[in-house]
Image (cartoon, rainbow, N blue to C red):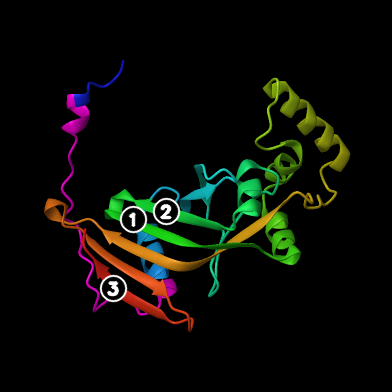
């Protein structure tokens, strides 16, 4: 049954847990992210590394999906996927994307925009070998984002690959699968506040590769 529109309009939440002060946030957005991420883990947020990845097609049509953050360094945020998937094709044609984290338990949101690059083959190989064996098989078995007639096709391909690789043989990384890194030029830390007067602190990368920090109106 569809929820009546008046009921949707009545859904409310007052944000009162924390505040975000520009004078106490780190001058380094990566350090600020690490602090918030650690707090999300401490608050037992389900899948704190889950993030919304938005990409754009060649026609300018946006699309989004949830992926998992699997690496963070001084350059950017790393995740892994099938290069031939829809998102892979869109990132190949339009090398800018955005990420959004939402941690409702902390009344926080984090938005990140930047340039996409592939990580090195070595990085992709190392991460692939750290995955559960079933997930390694899955990366080979699924022609991600393509139309298939039924799930039976995946089951049959999985069975064939399990027979091929056995239980002890190392499974190589598929050539069509690997990592991407988003190199941010813009990050916004959002903390919910009462009366919808939320705190928003934004970091912008300058031409000399330094960060400026500003407060935005909610």
Q: Position of residue 125 (x, y in %)?
A: 74, 60
Looking at this rendering, what residue extends furthest in the front direction? 59
* Residue on which disc 3 sits: 214
Mark nearer the viewer, 2 or 3: 3
Magenta segment, principal secondary structure? loop
Q: Position of residue 18 (x, y in %)?
A: 20, 62
Question: CB under 8 Å between callouts 1 and 2?
Answer: yes
Q: What's drawn in magenta, residue-wise?
A: 6-31
39, 101: nearer the viewer? 101
Give the residue drawn at x 16%, y 57%: 197
Question: CB under 8 Å between callouts 3 and 1?
Answer: no
Give the residue drawn at x 29%, y 50%: 105
Q: Which of the two labelled residues, at mark 3 and mark 1, occupies the earlier sequence position? A: 1
Q: CA distance from mark 2 to mark 3?
A: 19 Å
Give the residue drawn at x 25%, y 77%: 24
Q: Quadrant of the N terminus?
A: top left
Secondary structure found at label 2: strand
* Residue on which disc 2 sits: 100
* Residue on which disc 1 sits: 109
Horizontal side, residue 109 vs residue 159: left or right: left
Q: Residue 183, relative to residue 139: is it above or below? A: below
Q: Which of the two labelled residues, at mark 1 and mark 2, occupies the earlier sequence position? A: 2
164 in magenta: no
Residue 127 visible: yes
Secondary structure found at label 3: strand
């Amino acid at each position: 049954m569809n929820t009546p529109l008046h009921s949707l309009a009545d859904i409310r939440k007052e944000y009162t847990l924390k505040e975000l002060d520009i004078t106490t946030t780190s001058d380094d957005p990566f350090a600020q992210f690490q602090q918030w991420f650690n707090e999300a883990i401490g608050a037992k947020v389900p899948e704190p590394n889950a993030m919304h990845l938005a990409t754009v097609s060649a026609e300018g049509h946006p699309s989004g999906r949830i992926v998992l953050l699997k690496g963070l360094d001084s350059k950017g945020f790393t995740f892994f996927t099938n290069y031939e998937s829809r998102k892979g094709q869109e990132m190949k044609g339009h090398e800018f994307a955005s990420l959004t984290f939402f941690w409702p338990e902390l009344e926080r949101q984090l938005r990140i925009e930047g340039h996409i690059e592939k990580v090195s083959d070595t990085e992709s190989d190392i991460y692939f070998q750290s995955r559960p064996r079933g997930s390694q098989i899955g990366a080979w078995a699924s022609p991600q984002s393509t139309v298939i007639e039924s799930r039976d096709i995946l089951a049959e391909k999985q069975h064939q690959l399990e027979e091929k690789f056995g239980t002890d043989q190392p499974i190589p990384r598929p050539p069509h699968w690997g990592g991407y890194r988003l190199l941010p030029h813009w990050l916004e830390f959002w903390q919910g506040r009462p009366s919808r007067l939320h705190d928003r602190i934004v970091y912008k990368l300058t031409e000399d590769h330094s960060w400026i920090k500003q407060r935005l109106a909610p």
